């Protein structure tokens, strides 16, 4: 079975959709890492992590997985 996706790259909205499709694998990896591995970083901490540190760590993970570009 074959699937062909077509995008009109002169249309800004379709250009965004194309970039999202091309980055879907990176996004899936990011979500997997976030849900299955990243939380372990905080699991055995003596003190609760502060929200700013958690968000910074999530953004760093997004950069590592090449999905930071999808951030607003």
Image (cartoon, rainbow, N blue to C red):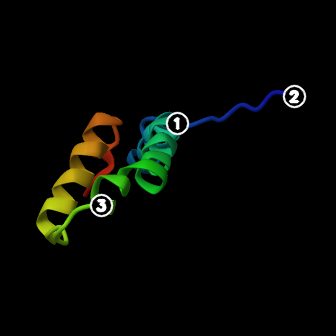
> Up-down: is 22 above or below 11?
above
- Binning the other alpha carbons within 10 Å of mark 3 as few (below 14), some (14 to 19) or many (20 upward) gives few
Q: Position of residue 13 (x, y in %)?
A: 43, 51
The numbered dot on residue 44 is 3
Question: Judging from the image, what secondary structure is the residue with disc 1 in?
Answer: helix
Q: Which residue is mark 2?
A: 1
Q: Which mark is residue 10?
A: none
Rendered residue at 34%/42% (across/down)? 67
Q: Nearer the viewer, mark 1 or mark 3?
A: 3
User: Of marks 1 and 3, which one's residue comes earlier in the chain?
Assistant: 1
Q: Nearer the viewer, mark 2 or mark 3?
A: 3
Left or right, residue 19 beside residue 48: right
Q: Disc count in the image?
A: 3
State left or right for residue 40 relative to residue 59: right
> In this orientation, which residue lies closer to the viewer: 47 or 9?
47
Q: Percent position (x, y) of residue 66?
A: 33, 35
Q: Which of the two labelled residues, at mark 1 and mark 2, occupies the earlier sequence position?
A: 2
CA separation in Å, label 1 and label 3: 30 Å
Give the alpha-carbon distance from disc 1 to disc 2, as whole Å.
20 Å
Coordinates of residue 1 in the picture (x, y in percent): 87, 28
Tell me the quarter of the image containing the C terminus: bottom left
Q: Which residue is mark 1?
A: 25
Q: Residue at x 20, y 61 (%)?
A: 55
Which residue is outermost to the right? 1
Q: Earlier in the sequence, mark 2 or mark 3?
A: 2
Q: Is residue 70 above or below residue 72?
A: above
Quadrant of the rendered structure where residue 19 is?
Answer: top left
Q: Secondary structure at mark 3?
A: loop
Image point (42%, 45%), residue name: 30
Along the viewing direction, whichever of 35 and 27 lies nearer the viewer: 35
The answer to which quarter of the image holds residue 42 is bottom left
């Amino acid at each position: 079975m074959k699937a062909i996706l077509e995008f009109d790259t002169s249309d800004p909205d379709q250009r965004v959709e194309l970039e999202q499709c091309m980055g879907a694998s990176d996004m899936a990896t990011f979500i997997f890492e976030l849900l299955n591995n990243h939380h372990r970083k905080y699991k055995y901490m003596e003190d609760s992590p502060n929200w700013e540190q958690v968000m910074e760590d999530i953004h760093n993970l997004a950069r590592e997985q090449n999905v930071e570009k999808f951030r607003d």
